[in-house]
């Protein structure tokens, strides 16, 4: 997609998010969004980054002014980093000036990570999208994570590695629960994943494509249900 068309799509999406108030993507903003296009940021990935900024903006209370696309840059790049980790090296264009964004970002502490995970699990359960049958499992996950949070700040070495492994196992369990949630149209999620991977399909082997597609479907599933990534 040409950068000019990409920018128009972003501008249209931003207009909808701003309740119809048009904020033009021109000048430095056009240059910024053009870099996203040139760096291979899929439109839907950029949209999710914009959504993430708006969610945080709304959480602070009533909006006072329309949001400019420049404000969304960090969130768009964060979501793109997550997307690239799912897809793998084939999604990292050579010579990309922003390709090291993920390597430069500060790593959250484990206690802070677990705090956010517990909050999102609580919110997801309150929404009820997972179904009542998942409540017991989420209670157990939350109890175990709460215990991990109490000790994570002071553990080192083998004990820390064991905790990281346990968090990965809990994360896989959470995805299994999510996949069984009601009203989840997996075929629709797979179509969205195929759309995100369209520009990279020729660069990926069949096995890598399948792994990347599955990882993106899992991420879309989490987003649909408001679930956290437990792995650290």
Image (spheres, rainbow, N blue to C red):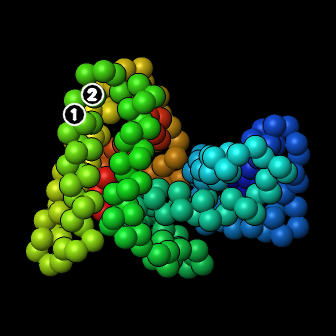
**Position of 221 relative to 127 (above/below):** below
Q: Position of residue 139 (x, y in %)?
A: 25, 36
User: Which of the image's four quarters has the C terminus?
Assistant: bottom left
**Depth check, front residue: 87 or 205:** 87
Total residue callouts: 2
Q: From the viewer's perspective, tell me whether residue 157 is left or right of residue 180.
A: left
Q: Residues within 10 Å of mark 1 (few under 14, many from 20)?
A: some
**Position of 160 relative to 134 (above/below):** below
Mark 2 element type: helix
User: Which residue: 47% across, 75% down?
Assistant: 106
Mark 1 element type: helix
The image quarter containing residue 157 is: bottom left
Q: Position of residue 108 (x, y in %)?
A: 41, 69
User: Which residue: 49% across, 74% down?
Assistant: 105
**Extreme front residue here?**
150
Q: Position of residue 38 (x, y in %)?
A: 66, 65
**Depth check, front residue: 88 or 15:** 15
Q: Mark 2 = which residue?
A: 134
- Residue 45 showing in the rendered view: yes
Specify the label residue 137 is tagged with: 1
Inter-mark Cα distance, 1 to 2? 5 Å
Specify the label residue 157 is tagged with: none
Q: Residues within 10 Å of mark 2 (few under 14, many from 20)?
A: some
Disc 1, disc 2: CB below 8 Å? yes
Q: Position of residue 187 (x, y in %)?
A: 41, 27
User: Which residue: 42% across, 35% down?
Assistant: 124
Q: From the viewer's perspective, tell me whether residue 32 is left or right of residue 134.
A: right
User: Which residue: 74% across, 49% down?
Assistant: 10
**Depth check, front residue: 215 or 56:** 56
- Residue 94 showing in the rendered view: no
């Amino acid at each position: 997609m040409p950068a000019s068309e990409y920018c128009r799509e972003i501008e249209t999406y931003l207009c909808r998010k701003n309740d119809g108030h048009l904020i033009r993507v021109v000048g430095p903003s056009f240059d910024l969004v053009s870099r996203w296009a040139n760096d291979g940021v899929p439109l839907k990935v950029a949209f999710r980054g914009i959504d993430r900024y708006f969610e945080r903006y709304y959480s602070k209370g009533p909006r006072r002014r329309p949001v400019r696309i420049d404000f969304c840059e960090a969130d768009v790049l964060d979501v793109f980093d997550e997307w690239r980790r799912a897809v793998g090296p084939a999604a990292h264009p050579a010579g990309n000036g922003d390709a090291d964004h993920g390597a430069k970002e500060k790593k959250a502490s484990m206690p802070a990570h677990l705090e956010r995970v517990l909050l999102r699990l609580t919110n997801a359960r309150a929404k009820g999208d997972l179904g009542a049958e998942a409540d017991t499992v989420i209670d157990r996950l939350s109890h175990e994570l709460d215990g991990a949070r109490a000790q994570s700040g002071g553990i080192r070495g083998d004990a820390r590695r064991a905790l990281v492994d346990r968090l990965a196992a809990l994360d896989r369990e959470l995805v299994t629960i999510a996949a069984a949630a009601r009203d989840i149209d997996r075929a629709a999620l797979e179509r969205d994943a195929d759309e995100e991977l369209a520009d990279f399909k020729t660069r990926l082997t069949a096995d890598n494509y399948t792994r990347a597609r599955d990882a993106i479907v899992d991420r879309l599933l989490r987003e649909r249900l408001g679930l956290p990534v437990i792995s650290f």
